[in-house]
Image (spheres, helix red, strand yellow):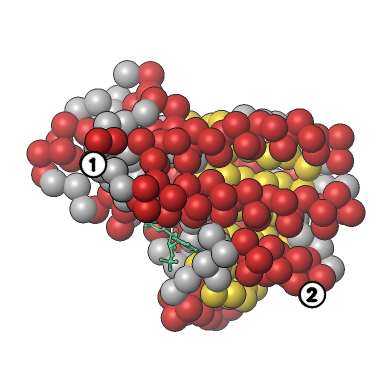
Amino acid sequence: MFSLANKVAIVTGASRGIGKVIAQVFAKAGAHVICVARSEDAIKSLADEINTNGGSASHVACDISDGEAFSSLITGTAKEQGRLDVLVNNAGITQDNLLMRMKEDQWDTVLNINLKGAFHGMKAAVRPMMKNRKGRIINITSIVGLTGNPGQSNYAASKAGLIGLSQSVAKEVATRGITVNCIAPGWIGTDMTDELSTDVREQFLSRIPANRIGSPEDIAYTALFLASDEASYITGQTITVDGGRVIN
Ligand SMILES: NC(=O)c1ccc[n+]([C@@H]2O[C@H](COP(=O)([O-])OP(=O)(O)OC[C@H]3O[C@@H](n4cnc5c(N)ncnc54)[C@H](OP(=O)(O)O)[C@@H]3O)[C@@H](O)[C@H]2O)c1
């Protein structure tokens, strides 16, 4: 169950945090994983580690906001491997500021990576997936895209946009055996959240019914399920993985 044997998966943002663990979990499930991020050393050492442990992985350094480079990475991978089964658009950044202080550059940078990057990835991935009449696209959004968050209007807009983008594409490709879903993590312990002060951490924790910070594995196993053959009737959905935060 939930095997990815003989499948080819591209995972963006694989140099650390959630994306790194998704790549490790997919490889353990039998996929050949292409690890993508800008930090070449980190993705090379992840691919080496996966290969040493009996899995199968390669790496390609790419800035996913460079549409041409990201598209040709996907097209090239599908050609080289003869197929593309799974694309996980996980790469994302924050550049927080209150709206009144937010620079246009902060808006553009966050939207270009978090939303436009996923657009480029999905656009390139659906062609080989349509050819195979099968595919899985998984976009990592955030609960902030569902609720908003002060100081994160650019990030929340990018993550809410990702949900609308996913729902629209899900409708376009559903008859071709391709599913498009989002995972909306709550607070997950990674570099992105390690910067929070003790006060903010305690305040956040008090609002999580599960009373713990999530782990990258919590997201990776959800991604594994959505990537599997068993999830073929789930599309256009956003699965919240947040210890109950948004219901509180
Ligand atoms: N951690 C959380 O609590 C949380 C909550 C909700 C949603 N999320 C979402 O989950 C995803 C992963 O978050 P994380 O916590 O694992 O973040 P992270 O530890 O900061 O890692 C972000 C990853 O994205 C990559 N990346 C950033 N910009 C890129 C670009 N232009 N091109 C290619 N790769 C790029 C980074 O690699 P390089 O720097 O090497 O390029 C890194 O591998 C993000 O989309 C984030 O918004 C996280």
Query: Dot 1, how many residues are within 10 Å of its Cα: few (below 14), some (14-19), or many (20+)?
Result: few
Q: Quadrant of residue 79?
A: bottom right
**Farthest top residue?**
248
- Between 8 and 113, the one nearer to me in the picture: 113
**Farthest left residue?**
199
**Position of residue 219 measured from the top left corner of the image (x, y, whole percent):** 48, 45
Kindly state the secondary structure of the residue where label 2 is placed: helix
Please determine whether, in this image, residue 245 is positioned above or below residue 170: above
Taking the spot 53% from the left edge, 46% from the top edge, the residue there is 115
Is 8 situated left or right of 184 in this image? right
Q: If the picture is divided into quarters, which one holds ligand 1? A: bottom left
Closer to the chain start, of discs 1 and 2, is: 2
Residue under numbered circle 2: 80
Residue under numbered circle 1: 101
Q: Nearer the viewer, mark 1 or mark 2?
A: 1
Q: Real-space Cα distance between discs 1 and 2?
A: 46 Å
Taking the spot 49% from the left edge, 33% from the top edge, the residue there is 160
